[in-house]
Amino acid sequence: MQSRKLSSTPTVTGQCLCGAVQFAMEYPAFWAWHDHSRASRLAHGAVYATYVGTWRKRFRITAGESEINRFEEKETGAVRSFCRRCGTPLVYERTRSPHMINIPRALFQSRTGRQPIYHIAIDEMQDWAYAGEPLVPLKGYPGVFWKRSKKKSRMQEIRL
Ligand SMILES: [Zn+2]
């Protein structure tokens, strides 16, 4: 009987890097957002984190529950869980919205039903974040692209 509800609801799945922890979320997500806060930057080791938010009751761990560790932020009370085998951030629970949970967008293997059009802590965005500037191949390094320095592009503008 338990599987009846699951099979009638479309779900999307995801996992951590090593695959020990797997999860499913009912589709679609509630929303998706980019988090530029310092805490998320450090927790992910990335310039910002992109999350998919959903109702807690619409999310479940399907494998590897015992591999999940939790870290509580003292200042905010927020809880971040991660795979203790590979370190992948899994769930971010914020105290301000106890019925919602947030899952890194990158862990889903398919669409989640929401585009990340929202930004949180945009004032903390780092000046080294890639913002979609035009890139060019780096000569002699296949697969490496770079943004020409401003100085050089200004010179090019002057030449034009
Ligand atoms: Zn893992």
Image (cartoon, grey):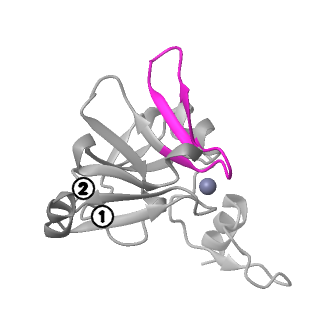
Q: Which residues are magenta?
A: 68-90
Could you tell me which quadrant the N terminus lies in?
A: bottom left
Q: Are marks 1 and 2 in contact (CB under 8 Å)?
A: yes
Disc 2 marks which amino acid? Ala
User: Which residue is disc 1 drawn over?
Assistant: 112
Q: Is residue 84 left or right of residue 115?
A: right
Between 35 and 81, the residue placed more toward the observer is 81
Q: Residue at x 54, y 66 (%)?
A: 133
* Image vertical order of residue 6 relative to residue 80, above or below: below
* Coordinates of residue 143 in the picture (x, y in percent): 73, 82
**106 or 85, which is in the foreground?**
85
According to the picture, the residue beneath numbered tag 2 turns out to be 29
Q: Residue furthest top?
A: 75
Residue 148: name its quadrant.
Answer: bottom right
Q: Residues within 10 Å of mark 2 (few under 14, many from 20)?
A: many
Residue 27 circle label:
none
Membership of 13 in magenta stretch? no
Residue 116 sits in quarter: bottom left
Disc 1 element: loop
For marks 1 and 2, the one nearer the N-term is 2
Task: Say which element carries label 2.
Answer: loop
Left or right of 6 in this view: 60: right
Quadrant holding ligand 1? bottom right
Q: Quadrant of the C terminus?
A: bottom right
Q: Residue at x 23, y 50 (%)?
A: 58
